Amino acid sequence: MNPYVLTILLSSLGLGTVLTFASSHWLLAWMGLEINTLAIIPIMAQQHHPRAIEATTKYFLTQATAAAMILFASTTNAWLMGEWEIHQLSHPLATTTVMLALALKLGLAPVHFWLPEVLQGLELTTGLILSTWQKLAPFALMIQVAPTINSSLLVAIGLLSTLVGGWGGLNQTQLRKILAYSSIAHLGWMVLILQFAPSLTLLSLSLYIIMTSSAFLTLKTNNALTINTLATSWTKSPTLAALAALVLLSLGGLPPLSGFMPKWLILQELTKQGLPLSSTLAAMTALLSLYFYLRLCYALTLTIYPNTLTAAAPWRLNFTMITLPLSIITILALGLLPLTPAVTAMLAL
C-alpha cells in the first residue's frame, strides 16, 4: 500500500477513536465509530486475497449493524426522554439496545460469531489492530453507559463470553482463531467487573492489549499461523520460543506473570460485591482458556515436528524486523505482577 495512503488511513483510525473518547453527544460518538470502521476497511482488504475480502465484508456488515443499532437507541432515547447526552441514557429500551450494539462491536458472546472468522482472514499486523486498537472506542462508550445498564445483563454477558472464549478455542489449530477466542474470554472478564469497579476494567484492558500485542508480534516474527508451524519456531529462535510460551501462560493468567494480576483483582472484587457464584464460574471458565494456552506451549517447547512440513523452510537468518517494540512489550507482559500493591493503592485513591 502507498505509504501516504497508509498514513491517512492510520491517522483517520486514530481520529475516529479520539473523537469517540472526547464526545459527550451520541451523534459525535457515532461519527467517531464510523470513521474508525471506514478507516480500517482498506487496511483489511489490502491483501486482495479472497479470505481477506470475505473477512472485510463480514466486518463491515457487523460494524454497520452495530452502528445502526447505536443510532436507533440514541434516537429512541432522545425521542422518549429528550436527551442526546451519553451520560443521560436512561430509557430501558435504549440502554439494552446500546449494550447489545457495543457487544456486537466488541465481539462479546452471544454476538461473537463474526470475530474468529474475520480475524482468521486477516494478516497478523491487521489482526493486532483489530484485537487491540479497535476495542478502545466501544469500551469508552460502554464504561460511560455502564451505570444505567442492568447489572444482571452485564454479569450474564461477561460469564457467557468467558465460557465461549474458553470453549471455542479448545478445538482450534489456527493461531488467529485461538487468539480471537482468547480476546472474547478476556473481554468477558472486563465486562464482568465493569459496573462494580470500572478502574479494574481499564487495568484489564491495558494488560490485555500488552499481552495480545506481544503474542501477535511473536507470531509475526516467527511467521507462524498454525500450531504445526509454531512447533518449528524453536529452531529459528529458541529464546523467542521460550518467551512466547511465557507470554501465552501470562494470557492464561498464571502467576507469577502479569496476566494473573487482573484475574486476581477481579475475583477479589466480585467476592467483595457478594457474587461468590459468579467469581467461581469465572475462575472455572479460565481453566478452559488455560488448557488451549498450555496446548500451544506444549507444541512450542516440547515437540519436535516431523520434517514433512509444507511451510517454508525455517532457515536461521538475521532478523530484518525491528524487534525493540516486541522486546519492551514482552517484558511488560511478563513482569508487572510485583507492581500489584502499587496498582491497588492507585485504584483505591
Image (cartoon, rainbow, N blue to C red):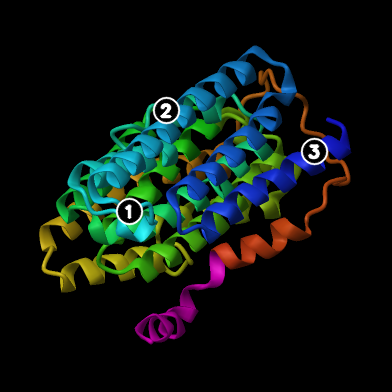
User: Is residue 98 inside the magenta stretch?
Assistant: no
Going from N to C along the chain, the mark reached first, 2 or 1, is: 2
* Location of the N terminus (image quadrant): top right
What is the three-letter code of the residue carrying label 3? Leu
Helix, strand or loop at mark 2: helix
Foreground label between 2 and 3: 2
Residue range (magenta):
334-349
Note whether residue 129 is visible. yes
Foreground label between 2 and 1: 1
- Seen in the picture, residue 117 relative to 205 is either above or below; the reply is above
Q: Position of residue 170 (x, y in %)?
A: 36, 33
What residue is shown at x 82% (from left), y 52% (from top)? Answer: 322
What is the three-letter code of the residue carrying label 1? Glu
Going from N to C along the chain, the mark reached first, 3 or 1, is: 3
Quarter-of-image position of residue 341: bottom left
Crowding at mark 1 (Cα within 10 Å: few <14, some 14-19, many 20+) = some
* Image disc number at residue 234: none
Q: CA distance from mark 2 to mark 1?
A: 23 Å
Q: Position of residue 176 (x, y in %)?
A: 54, 33
What residue is shown at x 32% (from left), y 70% (from top)? Answer: 265
Q: CA distance from mark 3 to mark 1?
A: 38 Å
Q: Which residue is mark 1?
A: 83
Helix, strand or loop at mark 3: helix
Q: Which residue is mark 2?
A: 65
What residue is shown at x 63% (from left), y 66% (from top)? Answer: 331
Relative to 153, 207 lies left or right: right
What residue is shown at x 38% (from left), y 87% (from top)? Answer: 349
Q: Which residue is mark 3?
A: 6
